[in-house]
Amino acid sequence: MQKKIRDIIEIDEERCTGCGQCVLDCAEGAIALVEGKARVVADIYCDGLGACLAGCPENALRVIRREAEAFDEEAVRARFLRQGRADSPFARPGALRWPLKIMLLRAETPFLKGVDLLVAADCAAFAAPDFHGRLAKGKTLLIGCPKFEGGDVLARQLGAIVRTAGPKSLLVVRMEVPCCKALSQACRDALKMAGGRISLREAVVGRGGEISGL
């Protein structure tokens, strides 16, 4: 398989204590414990996103750029299916993918490509009892808070995601409180930045959990 320069996980074996937290945190199953140390099983299983970094108590993991085989989501899928793993992100249709936070994602993250995108306020899923059944089903979910992360910051990140991943549609779900209107504006600004022509819909969650706007 052809190699290219890309982001990938590097593990410092001197720091690694073999606790296994990174194994649990890696949704693609790219890390395993070998002789008491965490190791990347194969480059094709590692997307280089870095979701495994935060949980390491020894700071033994980092993202570097080096020559490596391209991440292969189909290879990950086939491996999970061969192993029959219940925690596979491919084990059930519409399974949530992690990370969810907009600012933790890279625009080139494979699971964002060509999807129906749901951008929700952080509070929305907790305020709306039927959030997953009515709003998130069949969509790729991203969450953010314009009050704490900044509407302009979210707009730039979402613009990069839309430009790179090319989602089919975008649904923004915000709370009825005034500060949350900035999330909808961030999505509109992101579409302008990306020059895309995808549809944008908005739903509003009331303080009592009711959903309007769809």
Image (cartoon, rainbow, N blue to C red):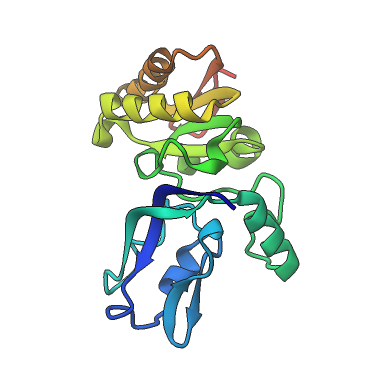
Whether residue 205 is visible, yes or no, is no
Counting from the top left corner in percent of width and height, residue 161 is at 44, 30
Q: Quadrant of the C terminus?
A: top right
Counting from the top left corner in percent of width and height, residue 149 is at 26, 35
Q: Residue furthest front?
A: 2
Q: Nearer the viewer, residue 178 or 155?
A: 155
Q: Residue at x 34, y 56 (%)?
A: 63
Q: Is residue 93 left or right of residue 154?
A: right
Counting from the top left corner in percent of width and height, residue 128 is at 52, 37
Total number of numbered discs in the rendering: 0
Q: Residue at x 39, y 50 (%)?
A: 7
Q: Residue at x 48, y 79 (%)?
A: 33
Quarter holding residue 53? bottom left
Q: Nearer the viewer, residue 5 or 125?
A: 5
Counting from the top left corner in percent of width and height, residue 196 is at 49, 14
Give above or below for 102 relative to 38.
Answer: above
Q: Nearer the viewer, residue 70 or 205?
A: 70
Whether residue 175 is visible, yes or no, is yes
Q: Nearer the viewer, residue 175 or 210?
A: 175
Q: Is residue 95 left or right of residue 70?
A: right
Q: Residue furthest bottom?
A: 35
Give above or below for 21 relative to 152.
Answer: below
Q: Residue at x 71, y 70 (%)?
A: 83
